[in-house]
Image (cartoon, rainbow, N blue to C red):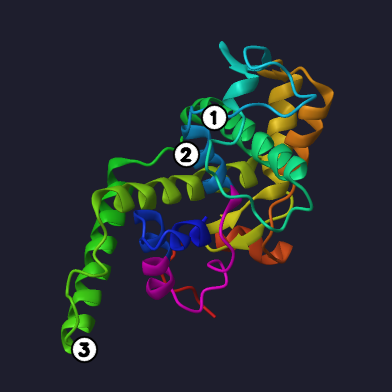
Amino acid sequence: MVRQHLRHGQQSPRVGMVLWMTRLRSGDPTWRIASPFALACILAASTIAAEPLPGTPSGDEVVAHVLSIRIRSDELDPPPGMARNQGFSSDAAWTEHVRARRLEGRIVEPLRKEFCREQHCELSPEDTRKILDQLKLGEEKMRADQAARRTDPDASALDPAAREMFLQMMANRKFHKALYERYGGEVISQVLGPNAVGAYRRWLEDEESRGRFEITPPALRDGFYKAVSGYGGGRVPPEEAREIFSHMPWERRSP
């Protein structure tokens, strides 16, 4: 995602946020690898459909549903102009991955909202205040550093879109903490925070078994679970997993 924005010669709010957070918490092992879940949410937000490849369901075919929401095949296709990740062996493999990630975003978001209401893992007004206070402190420090170097004092300031993205990232942290406390399992560290990958899959399997969502084409379902199990990051030892969720990124942890 970062490479795609830089390829166009622009620094998006999301890229600026990642660079800012790296400076905010340099050396923290939870800030190493970009979160594929963030990409899934961004991809899910796009509703522009591309022409499907041969062999895929027709554009208006309903391929999944979550709660009362129907998901059509054409909602999952890569948007026109989206650059293919060169890590995939073929266009077909890349398209399959993008469709799985877009499906993940569409299925997870409504389920997550209900889960967080039930488990009380939504961001509270107090959470939001603390986060925005820390953002303000970070911005002030960067402006002071740049003023000392006689560079543009506004070059690293976060715009409202980046602030909102940061709040979403902190909400994601609370969500994964609640998942881990309920389901346990493997935790990995990523640049956007700890990811309870084991609990995340168990939760989705639980929701599917309860009939809360269904994916009709078997190949699409297989790709979905491959995607939700395919997050990369540094493995957090089990004895440290609970501790890693106990502090926000800017808080110092005891050695």
The residue at which mark 3 appears reads as 149
Q: Which residues are magenta?
A: 19-36
Q: Earlier in the sequence, mark 3 or mark 2?
A: 2
Q: Secondary structure at mark 1?
A: helix
Q: Given contact means CB atoms under 8 Å apart, are the residues at marks 1 and 2 in contact? A: yes
Instruction: Please check the rendered image and state whether residue 23 is part of the magenta-colored stretch, yes or no.
Output: yes
Circle on res. 121: 2
Q: Which residue appears at 36% of the width and 68% of the height? A: 20
Q: Which residue appears at 28% of the width and 42% of the height? A: 125
> Is residue 132 depicted above or below 204 in this figure?
below
Q: Earlier in the sequence, mark 1 or mark 2?
A: 1
Is 52 on the left or on the right of 31, as rendered? right
Separation (CA) of disc 3 from disc 2: 41 Å
Residue 149 lies, in percent from the top left, at 21, 89
Amino acid found under the numbered disc labelled 1: Phe
Q: Earlier in the sequence, mark 1 or mark 3?
A: 1
Separation (CA) of disc 1 from disc 2: 8 Å
Q: Nearer the viewer, residue 183 or 98?
A: 98
The residue at which mark 1 appears reads as 115
Residue 74 lies, in percent from the top left, at 61, 22
Residue 124 falls in which quadrant of the image? top left
Amino acid found under the numbered disc labelled 3: Arg
Q: Main secondary structure of the magenta part?
A: loop
Foreground tag (1 vs 3):
3
